[in-house]
């Protein structure tokens, strides 16, 4: 069996909020919200990829923290794995792949139109970060 391509998602947490990013491409994903990140390249660890992607996409330096338990299939050969992360420096800006960013409080977590495949990942992230899944406020 071939190994799936790992897409690393960054659950960037700051001041009790989670950063969500709105994609600009491809057309079928544009306008939907996701965790910033991208494909792990050969020779990289997922944590390396997270640091690189947040530098490229948001212009920040970040430090990966904990793996969010679970993994979520995207398309046939891609799988999403998520790490929480903390900002070391910089203020996130949508430099590439995104046109809007939002810092969501636990009560706001379901206010954005997450990609379908991200919903379970965001639930697990909320549970890990805040000890609940936000379902009561959905
Ligand atoms: N970054 C990210 N991608 C996601 C999420 N959910 C989801 O289905 N995807 C999909 C969208 C893309 O098909 C794929 C990630 O590819 P990408 O285009 O963001 O990654 P990349 O920066 O490495 O891409 P590339 O332009 O170098 O090819 O995973 C998510 O939460 N975060």
Image (cartoon, grey):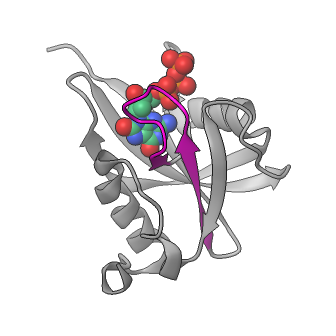
Q: Quadrant of the C terminus?
A: bottom left
- 96 is higher (above) or lower (below) than 126: above
x then y, percent, for residue 50: 59, 37
In this image, 83 relative to 120: left or right? right
x then y, percent, for residue 52: 67, 30
In this image, 135 relative to 65: left or right? left
- 56 is higher (above) or lower (below) than 106: above
In this image, 100 relative to 34: left or right? right
Could one spot residue 8 in this view of the protein? no
In reply to whether residue 25 is colored magenta, the answer given is yes
Q: Which residue is located at x 62 percent, y 38 percent? A: 98
In this image, 70 relative to 65: left or right? left
Instruction: Determine the residue located farthest toward the bottom in the rendered image.
Output: 136
x then y, percent, for residue 92: 76, 49
The image quarter in which residue 75 lies: top left
Q: Quadrant of the N terminus?
A: top left
- 69 is higher (above) or lower (below) than 57: below
x then y, percent, for residue 102: 64, 60
Q: Which residue is located at x 38 percent, y 79 percent? A: 134
In reply to whether residue 123 is colored magenta, the answer given is no
Task: Read off the magenta span.
Answer: 17-34
Could one spot residue 56 in this view of the protein? yes
Front position in the image: 8 or 91: 91
The image quarter in which residue 80 lies: top left
Instruction: Determine the residue located farthest toward the right in the rendered image.
Output: 90
Q: Which residue is located at x 65 percent, y 53 percent? A: 101
């Amino acid at each position: 069996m071939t190994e799936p391509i790992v897409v690393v998602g960054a659950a960037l947490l700051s001041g009790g909020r989670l950063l969500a990013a709105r994609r600009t491409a491809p057309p079928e994903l544009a306008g939907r919200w996701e965790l910033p990140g991208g494909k792990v390249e050969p020779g990289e660890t997922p944590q390396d990829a997270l640091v690189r992607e947040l530098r490229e996409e948001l212009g920040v330096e970040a430090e990966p923290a904990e793996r969010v338990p679970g993994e979520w299939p995207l398309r046939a050969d891609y799988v999403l794995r998520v790490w929480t992360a903390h900002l070391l420096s910089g203020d996130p800006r949508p430099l590439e792949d995104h046109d809007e960013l939002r810092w969501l409080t636990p009560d706001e977590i379901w206010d954005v139109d997450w990609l379908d495949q991200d919903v379970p990942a965001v639930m697990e992230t909320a549970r890990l970060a805040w000890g609940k899944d936000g379902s009561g406020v959905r």
